[in-house]
Image (spheres, helix red, strand yellow):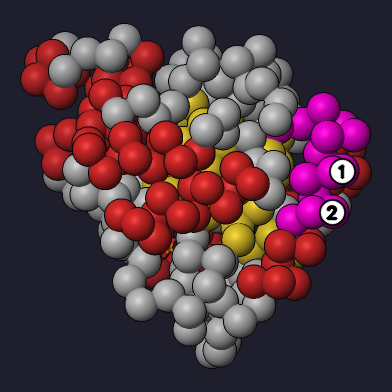
Amino acid sequence: MRPIDDSPLSRDGKVLILAYDHGLEHGPVDFEDVPESADPERVFDVATHPAVTSLAVQKGVAEAYYPAYEEDVNLLAKVNGTSNLWMGEYDSAVNWSVEYADEVGADSVGFTLYGGSNHEVEMAEEFRDVQEAARDHDMPVVMWAYPRGQGVKNDTKSDVIAYAARQAMELGADIAKVKYPGSKAAMEHVVEMAGPTKVIMSGGSKRSDREFLESVEAVIDAGGAGLAVGRNIFQRENPEYILDALEEVIFEESSVDTALAA
Ligand code: FBP
């Protein structure tokens, strides 16, 4: 395991990754509510907020926009990803190598593993190559640990999420990004199963400020390291407001009431 505390991915051991690969994963539908969010420049500007420890994007967005932001934004190269235009068992293409991500300026890498998919074995082998290359380049590895596919009946069950976090640890991820298992107690179990691998919550679809922040507070209280979030930031008209509140909850360990009152 590579300690992340001294890496650009974290601030004081905590993590807030702004994820912006939705144009590939979901398509333009995710930009409909706030049309300016289709412009990567707007999201790179948002990523300069001090609460954001890293911005996760795909290769094409990194190549086109990162050169103007390399002084102000830490780059997480999301090395695999796919559209939802096709049908079939869950899988994801590896779109750029760790070596190339390093050339583009990435500080860390991210990889989605669909445990339970009929393609899990091939994906785990691809993850091996990514994880070992990342070690060679001294880059922390974040696994989007998303059990999905024919082998998984319910991907929101806390046992399944705990298994995903454990799988991330056993395969050598430094951070496991998992769905919120529904309660602080369930999250504590997930964190325990991940051992030395840090656990962060996946943001999910847009929710009210309070509901979203309360889930983040529960993650921090349970020993989680933070959050990787996309829609709950860029689908808001005022992303800075929710980032200010997240800064309070994640880095200052303030309550949601304090964060919302600030
Ligand atoms: P969100 O906070 O918007 O959920 O973003 C996190 C993320 O993992 C993105 O990196 C990815 O594009 C998306 O969620 C995948 O969402 P889904 O759960 O629909 O596959």
Q: Where the N terminus falls, by quadrant?
A: top right
Q: Is residue 99 magenta?
A: no
Spatial separation of the CA atoms under disc 2 and disc 1: 6 Å
Q: Crowding at label 1, few (<14), some or many (≥20) Cα neighbours within 10 Å?
A: some
Q: Is residue 9 left or right of residue 102?
A: left
Q: Is residue 211 above or below residue 7?
A: below
The image position of residue 157, as x and y in percent, is: 29, 61
Q: Are marks 2 and 1 in contact (CB under 8 Å)?
A: yes
The image position of residue 155, as x and y in percent, is: 36, 66
Q: Is residue 205 above or below residue 122?
A: above
Residue 177 visible in the displayed image: no
Residue 83 visible in the displayed image: yes
- Magenta span: 127-140
Residue at 61% over, 81% down:
118
Q: Amino acid at mark 1?
A: Ala
Who is closer to the viewer here, 72 or 129? 129
Mark 1 secondary-structure assignment: helix
Who is closer to the viewer here, 101 or 72? 101
Circle 1 is placed at which residue position? 133
The image position of residue 187, as x and y in percent, is: 31, 40
The disc at residue 129 is: 2
